[in-house]
Image (tube, grey):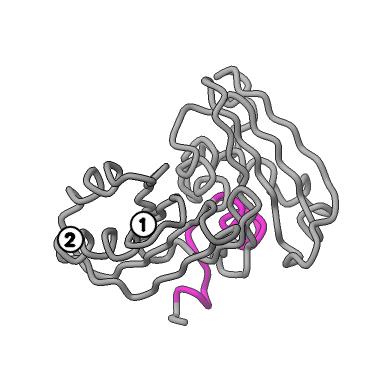
Amino acid sequence: MNVFDIVGPVMIGPSSSHTAGASRIGKTAAMLLGAPVAKADILFHGSFAKTYRGHGTDKAIVGGILKLDPWDPGIRTSIETAKEMGIEIIFRTGTIENAHPNSALITLTSQKGKTISVQGASIGGGNIVITKVNDMEVYFTGQKTTLIVMHQDVPGIIAHVTGLVAAGNANICNFRLNREEKGGLAIMTLEMDSDFDASFISQIKAIPFVYNTILLKLN
């Protein structure tokens, strides 16, 4: 933790947890979808569910889906902007089992029918943790550049991906693999803390049994 975590982020809204963090969860979901959004179904849990209107969490999370930064004044009118863009927005409240009190489950549908669900928690100071993607457990914060690779669980694929990352001079500071079952869908997350040549991304996308590759930079 540094002094900026204590003071809090530059942002629009009264609460770093309920606005800045919510904005980053929404932006992460939009980046993971990787396509223009047609519909956003947003489920608020815990304290988010109780205060999302009063604290502007609804505006913040939609602003994030529009890829606005937490300090962008456009967050104040994000819901109206989304509607003007033809994006259907649905807000719901409910319970997410074993979730942090400041959690949201976002299901996005693209204009071509592609969908993704992202569960995230705002843990204070504008910081977030993404805990599920498409109902599969993951764990990443977005504080560092993060490479997310969705793939089939087959022998050799981790070595292939990490070999290309190393060839691009990227330093991996955290690695995590989650899978549905042996041989099933898996999600590889690699957090990196160095400058690197991102040209290896296209090479990873071309690996057999890799379904999607996303380089996530929130800041």
The picture quadrant where one finds residue 20 is bottom right
| Nearest to viewer (mark 1 / mark 2) | 1
Alpha carbon separation for disc pair 1 and 2: 12 Å
Q: Is residue 8 magenta?
A: yes
Identity of the residue drawn at 35% across and 51% down: 215
Instruction: Write the start and end of the magenta stretch as one range.
Output: 4-23
Front residue of this view, candidates 51 and 217: 217
| Label 1 secondary element | strand
Identity of the residue drawn at 53% across and 64% down: 178
Q: Main secondary structure of the magenta part?
A: helix
The picture quadrant where one finds residue 62 is top right
Position in image of residue 158 (x %, y %):
34, 63
Mark 1: give few (<14), some (14-19) or many (20+) Cα within 10 Å: many
Q: Which mark, residue 196?
A: 2
| Label 2 secondary element | loop
Mark 2: amino acid: Phe
Q: Taking 163 as reference, is 76 left or right?
A: right
Front residue of this view, candidates 138 and 73: 138
Mark 1: amino acid: Leu
Identity of the residue drawn at 46% across and 57% down: 153
Quarter of the rendering occupied by the C terminus: bottom left
For label 1, the residue is 147
N-terminal-most mark, 1 or 2: 1
Position in image of residue 91 (x %, y %):
76, 37
